[in-house]
Amino acid sequence: SSSERLLVRNGIVFIICKSNEGSVVIDSKEYQLSQNSLIVLPENHIVTIHTGLLNQSNIIAVSLDYILSMPSPIDTAIFGYSRYRSVIRVSDDKFSDLQSYYQFIYKESKEQSKYQTEIIQSIFYALILEIVGEYERLFESTEQTHIRSDSLSDNFFRLLALHYREQHSVKYYAEQMHLTPKYLSTAV
């Protein structure tokens, strides 16, 4: 069967897999998909996915700026969680909710309305919050995976979410975190 190779750059891709058959390769590591799989791919990942699986999935890709323009810093948690686990399984009810959000976003994108952009942003924000909630539930219930909330990259993304509109220099963020700009650039 044919496969598609994707490079995720400067953004994040959400894949809601309707099929429970197949696998996805992320940075040379293969993940078997189970029923109700959700794939969250932050930037700078190389992904190989079977074309048939792509055709049976709902896919949303957005830029980093779009995520950072969301109203709450909780959205940046999606970057930390997905770095540790890009493929998760969600409950039947939650999977149905995620598909409903996707369908509503898709439907709204095809219509021409005065508040189309705001409606799509609001629904997408709700989708992000649902996904973050699923990650929090997953990581609270498993002992094997531990994400330190005070890790360097998580702190950086929190600061970025709060100040990205005004502050664009690495030096500013490094000073806020009591690091050198070179160290921050290398670590993140």
Image (cartoon, helix red, strand yellow):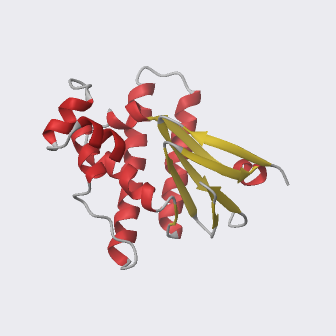
Choose top left, top right, bottom left or bottom right for residue 28. bottom right
**Looking at the picture, how far across and down is residue 84, in whole percent?**
43, 61
Could you tell me how many numbered marks the image carries?
A: 0
Above or below 176: residue 133: below
| Residue furthest out toward the bottom | 143
**Looking at the picture, how far across and down is residue 41, in whole percent?**
52, 49
Residue 117 appears in the rendering: yes
The residue lying at 48 percent from left, 22 percent from top is 113
Foreground of the two, 158 or 98:
158
Above or below 163: residue 188: below
**Looking at the picture, how far across and down is residue 70, in whole percent?**
32, 37
Left or right of residue 46, residue 160 in this image: left
User: Which quadrant does the N terminus fall into?
Assistant: bottom right
Above or below 98: residue 109: above
User: Which quadrant does the C terminus fall into?
Assistant: top left
The residue lying at 58 percent from left, 54 percent from top is 16
The residue lying at 22 percent from left, 58 percent from top is 150
**Looking at the picture, how far across and down is residue 50, in whole percent?**
75, 53
The residue lying at 66 percent from left, 58 percent from top is 24
Left or right of residue 72, residue 54 in this image: right
Foreground of the two, 41 or 15:
41
Foreground of the two, 167 or 121:
167
| Residue furthest out toward the right | 1
Residue 56 appears in the rendering: no
Left or right of residue 57, residue 164 in this image: left
